[in-house]
Amino acid sequence: MMAMGFGWALLWSSPAGMVLAAILAVFLDAKARHEERLLCQHFPDYPQYRRRVPRYLPRPPA
């Protein structure tokens, strides 16, 4: 959703769209962090998983 928001703002050359995409990105990041805190409380192995797996973009294969 973040990439889509920025993509649409760039496609339409819209400064207002870019601002809205940035606000969306901040909101979605805060939401993901909150959900990760809840997952850490509920699943004891989640912190270990979180260290291995990136939050947004996958790592290139080794």
Image (cartoon, rainbow, N blue to C red):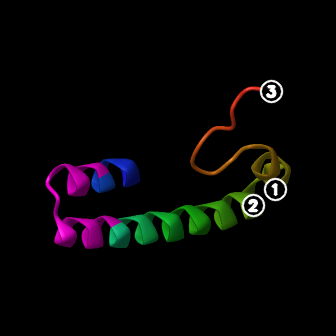
Residue in view at x 52 percent, y 71 percent: 30
Instruction: Give amino acid for label 2.
Output: Cys
For the magenta stretch, what is the residue range?
7-21
Q: Nearer the viewer, residue 7 or 51?
A: 7
Indicate which disc residue 47 carries.
1
Dominant secondary structure, magenta: helix
- Amino acid at pointer 1: Pro
* The quarter of the displayed image where residue 2 is located: bottom left
Residue 5 percent location from the top left of the image: 29, 55
State the residue at coordinates (16%, 64%). Answer: 14
Query: Closer to the observer: label 1 or label 3?
Result: 3
- Identified at 60% across, 66% down, the residue is 33
Q: Residues within 10 Å of mark 1 (few under 14, many from 20)?
A: some
Identify the element where label 1 is drawn.
Answer: helix
Give the labeled residue for mark 3.
62
Q: Please provide percent x and percent y for residue 8.
A: 22, 51
Q: Is residue 29 magenta?
A: no
Q: Callout 3: helix, strand or loop?
A: loop
Q: Which residue is mark 2?
A: 40
Q: Is residue 19 left or right of residue 53?
A: left
Q: Which quarter shows the C terminus?
A: top right
